[in-house]
Amino acid sequence: MDTFPIDTADMAFVAVEVVAVLDEKGRQVDDRDGVPRWRVRVLATGSALRKPEVLEVGVASRAEPRLSAMQPVTFSRLRARSWAQGDRHGISLSADTVNVMQSSNGKVPPAPAPA
């Protein structure tokens, strides 16, 4: 299936949580290269969105991505793919990597304070 790149230039993401992608037997799923799959939940904001949305982005990584809740993150090569299984359908998001956002001075910015 085709994937469609997502322009994230006008978007911001903050981490919510990282969970392993599991099969029906509770085992972690690997991609076709044998790399474990993770689901990164983020709060996304941007002018293209009517309101902030919680999104799930699939990422393959040998180690669990180490993200703190409310930590600003970026994705490399974020893309969308439509899917259908029987009467169910939707859009899945995936990225090559998820990265902690660096500030202009090279330090990781602090997570925003809870409201």
Image: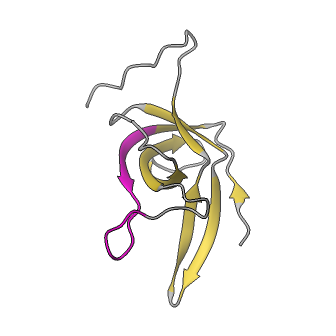
Residue 78 image offset from top left, x and y in percent: 63, 49
The image shows a total of numbered marks equal to: 0
Looking at this rendering, what residue extends furthest in the bottom direction? Answer: 86
Q: Is residue 79 magenta?
A: no
Looking at this rendering, what residue extends furthest in the front direction? Answer: 34
Quadrant of image for the N terminus: bottom right
Given residues 25 and 67, the one toward you in this image is: 25
Residue 17 image offset from top left, x and y in percent: 35, 46
Residue at 55%, 13% (x, y): give it: 106
Question: What's drawn in magenta, residue-wise?
Answer: 14-28
Q: Is residue 4 left or right of residue 86?
A: right
Residue 31, quarter of the rendered image: bottom right
Quadrant of image for the C terminus: top left
Q: Is residue 21 left or right of residue 115?
A: right
Looking at this rendering, what residue extends furthest in the left direction? Answer: 115
Residue 52 image offset from top left, x and y in percent: 44, 46
Residue 62 image offset from top left, x and y in percent: 49, 47
Residue at 46%, 49% (x, y): give it: 51
Residue 70 vertical position relative to residue 77 in the rendered view, above or below: above
Q: Does the magenta stretch include residue 19?
A: yes
Q: Which colour scheme is used?
A: secondary structure
Given residues 10 and 27, the one toward you in this image is: 27
Residue 95 vertical position relative to residue 103 in the rendered view, above or below: below
Residue 36 vertical position relative to residue 17 in the rendered view, above or below: below
Residue at 66%, 36% (x, y): give it: 9
Residue at 69%, 45% (x, y): give it: 7
